[in-house]
Amino acid sequence: MTKIRFNASRLLATAVSVALLALAPTVRADALQDIGKQIKQGQHAQALEQVDKYLAAKPKDAQGRFLKGIVLTEMNKPNEAIAVFSKLTEDYPELPEPYNNLAVIYAQQKQYDKAKQALEMAIRTHPSYATAHENLGDIYARLASQAYDKALQIDSSNSSAQNKLALIRDLMSTAGRPGKVTKPITDSRPVEPGKLAAAPKSISSPPAAAPSPAPVVTSGKPAEAPRAAPAKAAGDVNAEITNAVELWAAAWSRKDVKAYLAAYASDFKTPAGESRAAWDAERQKRIDKPGAIQVGYENLRIAVNGDNATVKFRQHYKSASLKTSSNKVLLMGKRDGKWQILQERVGS
């Protein structure tokens, strides 16, 4: 029986294009950026050496520990990576990203029950963590395919199992698409100075120093803890906007034209002043071209003004014929309870 190929690489959280936040000291940021560049360039041995040196001076630094887990994963040292991420879940149980990375490794080892448990923990700590929800869906699909395979091994004439297995195959046929981008952290709690970075494919991170204990906000959503009402409201708005940007980039990456176009408001101002129908048709034509598309972003910055917001970030785009990185600005507005794109600019 043909098996469904589980795409662990789509879940893999690799700390490339690291977007260090401005609160981190310059020296620390430079060191972590250098490590991130080495990871991106495949210089894993050098990255491991550098991160070990970094952690020798800052053994409790969460960002450095997180990057070490990434390097070990990339170096195919899963047991060591598991140890790093497991310790992070103990030290930062409110953060979903280490759980997600554990799930990635367990999935690669075909330990799907463990992967499921890790993703459930990620979702428990952060219910709006979209990447974990999608990854959990993939785990369920893989477990379902195994069950249907087993049913057909016992009874090859079971048409119901055959149909369901075919459906699962259809659902997983896009498993090779690029991984989802993730979101930057927007708050902190005391550990050591500096924050973990946000990175493509499911990593954001722990916290910067603060005068007194405070709940961590991952991907813009506050953990359950007493907070001043204004701060919580701002966090909620940032979370909504960040989620809207993530869904837009994810839809673009998986070439879901309908979901991609739905990210733009009905009063979206087209770049060249053409009609919305003409712009939609041109975008669909481009997205429907053969070949995969990968869209990622980093260094997300949000400025909210009532029901409008300006969102700035560094966009990374890759297709079969083009690879670019550029600054991007989205002017967004709240329409019928949803944040949608009103205008977009490149290079601003």
Image: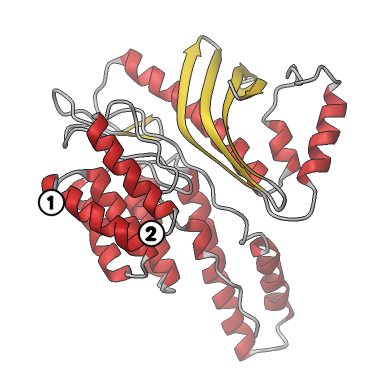
Quadrant occupied by the N terminus: bottom right
| 269 versus 39 height, above or below | above
Q: Is residue 314 left or right of residue 57?
A: right
Disc 1 residue crowd, few under 14, some 14–19, many 20+, Cα 10 Å? few
Q: Position of residue 269 (x, y in %)?
A: 74, 17
Mark 2 crowd level (few <14, some 14–19, many ≥20, 10 Å Cα): some
Amino acid on which disc 2 is placed: Gln
Q: Residue type at mark 1: give it.
A: Ala
Identify which residue is drawn at 62% across, 56% down.
Answer: 177
The mark total stands at 2
Residue 43's disc number: 2
Q: Which residue is mark 1?
A: 56
Asked if marks 1 and 2 touch (Cβ < 8 Å), the reply is no
- Above/below status of 344 relative to 151: above
| Residue 298 appearing in the image | yes
Q: Split into 4 quadrants, where in the image is the C terminus?
A: top right
Residue lying at 29% horizontally and 63% vertically, measured from the top left: 81
- When asked about the image quadrant of residue 221, the answer is top left
For the residue pair 1 and 298, the one nearer the viewer reads as 298
- Left or right, 71 with respect to 158, comes to left
Give percent across and percent down for residue 309.
54, 16
> Which residue is more in the foreground, 142 or 238?
238
**Residue at x-position 61% and y-position 78%:** 3
Give the numbered dot on residue 16.
none
* Residue at image location 39% in from the left, 61% down from the top: 103
Q: Secondary structure at mark 2?
A: loop
